[in-house]
Every structure is written in structure tokens, then in C-alpha cells.
Image (cartoon, rainbow, N blue to C red):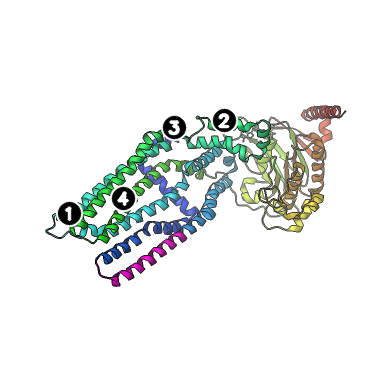
Amino acid sequence: MSENKSRMTLREAFAATRRGYSILWKAMPKIFPVSLAKNALTALSPYVPLYFTARLVNAVAGGGGGGEAWPLLAALLLSTALAGAAQAAASCRAQVIDNGYAFPARCRLHVDKMLRMDFQDADDPKTLALLNQIMEDENWASWGLWKLKDAFSRLVEAVLRIAGALALSASLFTLPVPQGSPLAALNSPWCLPAMLALMAGAVGLSALCYSRAQTFWSAIDGSFFNRAFNALCAHAQFNRSASADIRVYAQDKFLFQKAADPALDGFGPNSAIGRASRGPRGLLTAASEGVVRAYSGAVYLFVGLKALGGAFGVGAIAQYVGALAGLSKGAADLLSVLSDLRENAQFLLPVFQLLDIPNRMYQGSLTTEKRADRNYEIEFRDVSFRYPNTDAWALRHVSMKFKVGGRLAVVGENGSGKTTFIKLLCRLYDPTEGVILLNGIDIRKYRYGDYLALFSVVFQDFKLLSQPLGKNVAASEDYDRARAEQCLVKAGFGARLEQLPEGLDTFLYRDFDEGGVEISGGEAQKIALARVLYQDAPFIVLDEPTAALDPEAEAEVYTKFNDIVEDKTAVYISHRLSSCRFCDEIAVFDGGRVVQQGTHDSLLEAQGKYRSLWEAQAQYYQKRRQAREADME
Ligand code: ADP
């Protein structure tokens, strides 16, 4: 990040900001008109009472009686009330747009990209690091795209504040002090450029001090401190699974001590920013404000002298002083927002880097016509695969044909390539060498969505949502209730379903609903199976989803599943060989290769990897059983 910071020229910063705005415009167009209206009213509404007050004071001071003053008073009251009401209404609307529209749109920007990019990029630790950096920059001081939204509001406000001030103060320079007055020198045409030069000097100096003061702020690696805070305090607050540990080990004291450690405290009195605030940062901030106030003093003097000389009535004094104060505030705001935009440009680069990750995976156009006979045949033909940026082969020369409607078990030790095999089957990755065929045609030639729809998968670390049970099963907001119920019953969840107070509408977990239910690993498993059944895809894949269950419960799940997959083609990955006995075919993976293939009995007879795995597991379970029995005695 700091490298980008030093190299970014003004032109690059401008181009990055322009691109950032065009992304924001496409992602959340509604924020612009709302922000324009709100900030225009904020900038201009203070000038309305200023204008009418000046006229009213002139009318009263001029001694013209109530004739002129009353309508002016009415106009003052009405316009002030209307401007205030309009400003409040626009602020209210802007708040709703911010919370209800812009915030979700901002989250969607990243989520959409992550979900749409090739899986291999989404799965790449570098992409996750990039996303993390973007989120940390945003959390730290809204750096990145979010800053542009805020800057737009500030820009509108500053520009309109300046425009309003110029309109109200123009006559200050055109109304002359009557000739003969000792103050007639103030009619000099040099007064306007002199006042403007004074203002430019004051605002420029103030902005310089402000941006110098800001550098102390942006020099801190705020994302580091946010990360430290998350790792320590937020961990204790929000991480449910950690809370038991924290109590048992009384980790709270330790965590709070750590959080107060000066090395991890980025913003407290003893931090670098804390010390700088007592020293140069504090002085620069004070100077930035002081210079502007000194300029205001000069303005008061000029306006007061012209009024004394008789150039305008006493009412106009308030108008000019107010307008010129608005002018300098607008100019200072403009400079500060421009300096923030310049600073922000470097934080846009990681956002662009993420959004620019191209989709390289070839997407064909063939449709996988929906076949009533489910006669989909898949073949791996001499497939080898290396993960991106690695040298080792995760799969090597794998050739295999799936029997339609058959049950294939994939077994092997950890790291032997089983999950990689499934990732290739579901086209999350493409083979490095070789080809995978669906009904004789390279799977890359099919439409990606069509091909994916052929599979229902229960991944190792599947997740259910904190949503009603039925919606979890259907993975959708609208669904066929009868079918969801049927699938749950088939998956062995029928008895539990009957006990649930709200049936299919019962929330899983309690994040959104106090009446939600906490479910066990085995129950979650059954719901995940019901979800697979609801999808009714011709291929079903179970990737060791039963790792958390004991062997008996796992065997029950697999046996049940075997009964209910009916005519679908099923692939099971299991580390427990006994669970796969019912399969028509077992493929044994070792070091990325398929070293054996056959039925359970034929593989046991052969003196190979399967048999040695089987014997090792049999011994392991026997020892565990003995240990359990010894414990119980
Ligand atoms: P299994 O499912 O049999 O445990 P995997 O298919 O997960 O095995 O892993 C096969 C090999 O590929 C292992 O050496 C593993 O370290 C490697 N591997 C798995 N995932 C990745 C990844 N995302 N990036 C790089 N290497 C990986």
C-alpha cells in the first residue's frame, strides 16, 4: 500500500477517482440525486434567513415604519421554516437511502464479484487477502469506494456554499462609499482582488495545515489495529464458540491486558496519534482553524468600514459577514475534500484489482437437455491437475467412468486427492491435463450453469442458514412445502419435524428468532440430505460430510442415503471404509492416483492399498472400542 502511495501522481489519482465514481454510479445511482438535494439544502439554507434579516434590519433601521418590515418578517419566518423543514426531510431521506440501499449495495459489490469470479480465483488465498485488505481499509476510515460517496456530499455542499456566498456578497464590492468620505478609498477596484487573495492565502494555509495534520492520521496502519481489536476484544464478544474457553481459562484479563498494550493500541493517549495530538498534530489543527478565523476578522473590518463610510445600511453588514464566512468555509471544505480524495485514490487500487480479476474459464453454449431417463454419463479421461501456483500434482492420470445410477465410493488417506477429484467433477476447477466428458462431450462445451445444475453436493463443511427449516431445505424463499416435508421424512428427520413448534417455519439457530432451534451435527446432516433430495439433481455427491459423526451414526446416514438416492448417480467420499461397503464400486486414491478400483470384496481380497487401509482402520476402531469398554467398567 505504501508503495502505491508514493508512486501515485495527481493524474493517476484523478483517473482512479473518476473510475471509482463510475463504479459507484452503476452500483448505487440513487445516492447521487438524494445527496445532491440534501447537501444543496444544507449549503444554501443558512443564506435564506441571512438575506431576509439584512432587508428587515435595513427596513427597521431606516425608520420606514411597519409597512415594509411586516412582509419581510413574514418572508423571513416562512422561508426559514420551509428551508429548515426541507433540509430535515432531505436528511431523513438520505439516512434511509444510506442504511437501506447504499450499505447493502456496497456489500453486494464485493459479494457479487466473489461469487461470479472463477472458483479457482475465489479460492485463491491472494484473492482473500485482497478482499480482507479492502474490508480493513473500509473499516478503518471508510477508505476506498465508500469514501467517494461521502466526498460527493461534501463536494456538493462546498461548491454550493461558495456559489451562494458569491451571490450574496457581490454587492459588497459594487456598492460605493459616498465620495468625500475619508473611507472612499475602499471603493478602489483593488479591494476585490485583495480580499480574494487574502482569502486564497488563508484558505490555502489552513488547508495545508489540515492536510499536514491528516498525515499523522493516515500514516497509522489503522487496519492493523482494527485487526488486533477484532482478534482480541471482538473475539471475546462475538465468537460464541470461544466464550466457553474464555471463561474456563479466565482469558478475559489476559485479553484486556493485551488490548491495552501500547503496541496494539493505535488510538489511545499513549499511541503515536495520541502523542502527535499533544504536539505537532494539535498545533497544526489549531493553526488551520486560527488562520481562517483571522481572515474572518479582516472581513469584518472591511465590511464594518464600508458600512461606516455609508456604502450600505446596517442590515447588510450581517449579510456580507455571513456570506464571506460561508465563502471561506466553502473554500476550506473544498480543499479538504479534494485532499481527502487525493489520499483516498491509493485505497481504490485494491478495489479495482479485485473487480478486474477476469473470468478465464471457458464457458460453452451447449445445453444439458433435461433427460427424463437421467442417462448422464461422465468420464474422466487421463485427467491430471495442479492447483494454481503449485508444482505438485494433486491428481495424476485419473481415468474413470461413472456408471449411470451407480454408487461410487472414493476412499484414500488425507491429501490423496479425493476432494480435488470432486472439485473437478463439479467443474470448480478445470483439469490441467486430460479431459472430463459428459455423454461424450468435453464438459467445458456446456453452459456452466446448466452443467452445475446436474449436481447436488454436501460438502465437508456444509453450512445451514439461520433461516426457517423449509427454506433451508429448498434453498429458496418460495418453495413446495409438501415436497420439502417429504424430503425431510425421507432423510430421517420426520420424527424431529413433528416435534418442531412451527414445523417447516421453525428457524434454525437463534440468530434471528428466539424460538429458533439448535440442532445437533446428526440433525444438520439429515437436513443437508433433505436439501440434496429437494434439488433432485441426477448426480449426488457426499464429500465426507459425516466426519463429525461416530462410525455407527455415519453408517446409518450412508445406508439411509443409499436407499433414498433411487435412480440418481451417487459419489461418496469417506474416510471410513466400512461406510462404503454397499457401493457398486470403490476407487482407491493414493498420492493423486487411482491405485485400485473394484467392489469391497474384490479389493479386500487383493493385497493392496485398500486392504492395508481396511486393516489399519479395523485395528483403530477395535482399540477405541476396547478403550471405551474399559472406561465403562
Ligand atoms: P483429500 O480430499 O484426499 O484429503 P485433497 O484433494 O484435499 O485431498 O488434496 C490433494 C492435494 O492437493 C494435497 O496435497 C493438498 O495439499 C493439495 N491441495 C488441496 N487444496 C489445495 C489448494 N486450494 N491449493 C493448493 N493445494 C491444494
Query: Element type at marker 4?
Result: helix
Percent x, y of residue 603: 81, 32
How far apart in space, not on screen, are marks 3 and 4 (Cα)?
Answer: 32 Å
How far apart in space, not on screen, are marks 2 and 3 (Cα)?
Answer: 19 Å
Can the viewer see residue 160? Answer: yes
Q: Amino acid at mark 3?
A: Ala
Residue at horizontal 68 percent and vertical 40 percent from the top: 461
Left or right: 2 with respect to 311?
A: right
Q: Mark 3, residues whose alpha carbon is within 10 Å: few (<14), some, or many (≥20)?
A: some
Nearer to us: label 2 or label 4: 2
Residue at image mark 3: 272
Q: Amino acid at mark 2?
A: Gln
Residue at image mark 2: 257
The stretch in magenta equals 62-89
How far apart in space, not on screen, are marks 1 and 3 (Cα)?
Answer: 49 Å
Q: Nearer the viewer, residue 326 or 212?
A: 326
Q: Are marks 1 and 2 in contact (CB under 8 Å)?
A: no
Left or right: 55 with respect to 89?
A: left
Residue at image mark 1: 186
Q: Give the residue furthest to the bottom.
A: 67
Query: Element type at marker 1?
Result: helix
| Pointer 1 or 2: first along the chain | 1
| Pointer 4 or 1: first along the chain | 1
